[in-house]
Image (cartoon, rainbow, N blue to C red):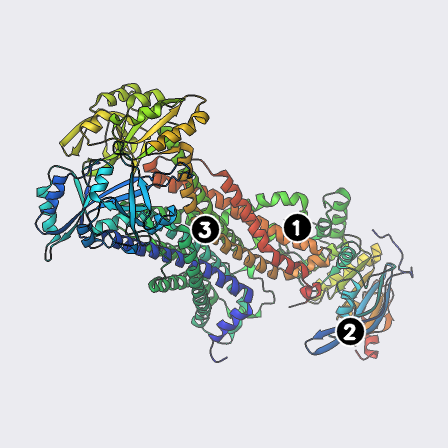
Amino acid sequence: MRRLSTLAWRSLAARRLRSILTGTGIALGVGALFAALATNAGIDASVERTVRDVIGRADLRVAAFEERGLAPETVAAIGGTPGVEVAAPIFERRTYLLQPPEAGHRSEPVTVHGIEPASYGQLHDLEVVAGAAFGSGASGEALVTEALAADEGVGVGGELTLLGAATPGPRAFRIVGLVAGNGPFYGDASRSVIVPLADAQALFERPAVDRVDLRLAPGGSLADVVSGLETRLTVQPYVIADRHDLEASLRASTADFRAMIALVATVVLFSAAFLIFNTLSMTVAERSREVGLLRAAGASRGQVYRLVLTEALLLAVAGSLAGILLGMLAAGVIAGYVRRVEGVTLGGAVLPPGAAALALLLGVAVTLAAAIEPALRAARISPVEALRAHNDPGAFQRARLRWLLAVFVVVGAAGLLLAPSDPVSGGAAAVLRALAVYGVLLAVTLALPGLVRPLGRLAAMPFGRLFRAEERLTRGALARDRSRTALTVGALAVGLTMVVALGVVARNVRLAGSEWLREVVPGDQIATSIRPVALAEGLGSQLAAVDGVARVTPVGTFDVAYQGVRLPAAAVIGADLQADGRLEMPEGGRAAALTALDQGGAVVVPRSVAQRFGIRLEDRMSFLTAGGLVELRVVGIVERSLPGRNGDSILVGWKDATEQLGVEGADFFAIRYAPGWAERAGPEVDAVARSLALQPATLERLQQAVSDALGHIFALFDAIAVVAVLIAALGVVNTLAMSVIERVREIGILRAIGMSRRQVWRMVVIEAAVLGIVGSVVGAATGVLVGVIMLLLAGSRLGVPFEPPWLTILLAIVAGVAVSILAAAYPARVAGRYSIVRAVRFE
Amino acid sequence: MSTTPTPTDTTPVLEAHELTKTYHLGDHTVEALRGASLSVAHGEFVALMGPSGSGKSTLLQILGGLDQPTSGRVVFEGRDISGLSDDQATRLRRDRTGFVFQFFNLVPLLNVLENVALPFTIAGINPRRAEIAERIREVLALVELTGKEQHRPDQLSGGEQQRVAVARALVTRPALLLADEPTGNLDYSSSREIMDALWRAANDQQQSIVLVTHDAKAAAYADRVLVVEDGRVLEPIVLGRREDHSAATLIARLAELGL
């Protein structure tokens, strides 16, 4: 041994089980971290790719704010703005394919893009992989995406019939070419049909466009064009967006996912930090005699300190590197599993070297932070320790849990570093949420040493009835080193906290989603339209004519501009809502308010909006429209209202909507059956709806879709959180192994005076069970608390009702106890097999 | 549990025939016992003496069922215990023998009362049952620890700790008490307290005892001293039961044997 640091290697090799456990803990923690980093990098890359695809060579996009779109004069004005070189008008609508009656019905919509090939081709590339590109854009020809062609089993030369507005009826298009993959679209637009602009406008009987993509003339300035547009476009409201706006909005919409995955990964790292701190503490306690000997032989405090840190560093580097490999695998699996976040389709996992370096750095930083206190403790060991006959590590040199504060700060800082830093409203909320979670975890950790004894006593009680001796000895073992017990229990609690908290959030968000729909939708079924259906078209009365349908309520969804903010709004028939008994209205007389909506000049505001803008009953709200300012009186404030794209909708009557706010028609019909008719009338309503190009869906199916989408994402978060539980299991193995090794003699004596192997085995298993119960119960309780805090932080906007996810809580507790008991298998076997003779021999 | 045969009763509680024990330590083979034989009568107090490495501790462990001989037989209360299963050996230790070791006899987390009651607790017998509680009081009185029931081991002196161990070994009225250097780590007066307690058990309660010791002053309490050398048991030195425990005769005899 040439250098003292060689001792670090040897010592790690000598305590192989513990080194492997610690290393695995670090690897799992860093793995989760790296997987989160890689997943988020993948999302970023996908956002960039989507922006590139969607924006193409355009510099600016002018989109219609209102449903009626941009009129030809407006399009001409945009094209004529100085500094604009190319203006490509684009029409976009969702619709359905007309299915031959014999084909089983397919319900997914398609997106129709109406383009002018000449201008569009200058800004966007349509990569045609089969057939021909649009030449001059002959009428009746269509390009389809490969994805749609594959779905429908059609190819070049085939035909697709698109449903359009009522009067021209469906129209067949001949497929002249296939566009690679999903085409340059995002979101649900992978099933896309591209047709000439005029055809699209004719199909939907709508001589307007939805947006105009612009390219600036060489040397043109964006600011000049924007101000030019502002002076020229005065008739219709519009929205100008450039590449950065789109990117920012996509980033903002994926921010919550990214923040959540970072938070969960950080909690895994917390769990790992507990394990590392605990194992290193044990190593130091166990070696006090060895350290005393080194000190007696002349090793300085600094040398001892460095020795312990060197060991930690070796573990950290090895564990972190293994973790990065694990994380790469995990990131690949996650990318395959998630596929799409908020309309952004994920490419494969991205493995940024910067993230690998960061993960390694954080792995080492957390490990070293956890190692400092044990190292200092080792350095303080007096040379006299070497002379002590009894080596009872439990009796002195216990870990000081206050140090966890420092470890928490390091891990917490790491977590905040990982959170998406977009300057959007979600960013601050995400940071607040993370801080709240860390705070609760820290508080619980610090309270644990005090809680462990009473909770342990309680948890052990049932065992005491059956196995008196084992239970008594177990309790003693747990009390022997409370820090160690607390750390072991703490790791388990932290892991389960996250699992339960996610359960709380998932359940309540789901519940809120479906409750919300049931409470605000005045129907058992809805039929969605892909275009605004003017009330005059009479689609509603055709649906209402079906036997068993009691009422059909048209609802139009749109946006309004209020105080410079885009708010979701819905046009409703107040009388129908009144008759249906929907909408809880704590402020304003319900009947009077709903009647006022139909009469006009009135608005009902959801509480969230009222709070945000300080709106009170009888206030006047001014909305900016094409026709100038429209003033409406607030006649009611509702608890919850129809869901819009970003929050609850404000409600207006149809009169105001069509006459003043530019709404063209209904986007869905809520269908209420007469009592007992749902079963019988359902199929016919579906058929009629389809024949009217409406998409029928029952309320349950909508709720199910919301629930499934949430379940899919939360399952991923759960899977990551479970890694923390696995780390905790390693901690239990380690603690029990240590507890058994420390008690070699005690167990020897017990065996000598007649304790059977089975009893010894049982004693260790009971110890594990008690650790498991305490950890699980504390974890579940903390989880509910953390979940509620997360809900409150988000729910101040959502108003989510609280209901504990009992099943998740039960499963978490059972799993926590089961994991602990499984972890006890090995130490318990070892303890049962101790040779009594060796155990009672002096040293 | 066992009743009261007199020291003159010659029925052996324990007989060992030609015991051998071979250990393998890497490439080395150590023969700890090479044909040791002995017998202990009911109520008899026997001491095993011998130099370090003579095999006396190994012999004691085999006699008490802690370890198995390589060859030979141990007959305990008329039953061959050399081939017992682990469970059978465990029951034998729990119900019929008691052990006192040199170190680490007590469970540090339990108080004196709990430590003494441990064999009952392990057997699933409630130690608060009247006759059990009475027996515990009796043995605590025998080792002169009445009043220290609630003390924890770390609050006791080394001698007191060993007396708790003796009390625990005696509490089930075992057929045989085995003690491995119980005074090895103690000062003179503590040693005497231990030996006095053991002697009272032998004398007042007809307890059969096998004691392994280095110390001639301790061995002098025994009725008979067996010298172990090189894994064999030499001729006994019979001292008889005496009140004065003088070691003079024993020391003289040991000197004759060149020990």
- Tell me the quarter of the picture where residue A794 sits: top left
- Mark 1: which amino acid? Glu
- Please state if A441 lies on the left or on the right of B49 as rendered: left
Q: Nearer the viewer, residue A458 or B42?
A: A458
Cα distance between the residues tagged 1 and 2: 38 Å
Q: Which residue is mark 3?
A: A721
Q: Quadrant of the C terminus of chain A?
A: bottom right
Is the residue marked by circle 3 packed among few (<14), some (14-19), or many (20+) residues within 10 Å?
A: many
| Residue A156 place in picture, x, y as percent | 32, 51
- Residue A232 position (above or below residue B109): above
Residue drawn at (33%, 37%) of the image:
A796
Q: Is residue B58 above or below residue A627?
A: below
Residue at mark 2 shares a chain with residue at mark 3 = no
Q: Where does label 1 land, which residue?
A: A470
| Real-space CA distance between mark 2 and mark 3, rounded to the nearest whole angstrom | 63 Å
Q: Residue furthest front?
A: A157
Chain under callout 3: A
Task: Judge the density around disc 1: few (<14), some (14-19), many (≥20) Cα neighbours within 10 Å.
Answer: many
Name the kind of residue labelled 3 in the image: Ala
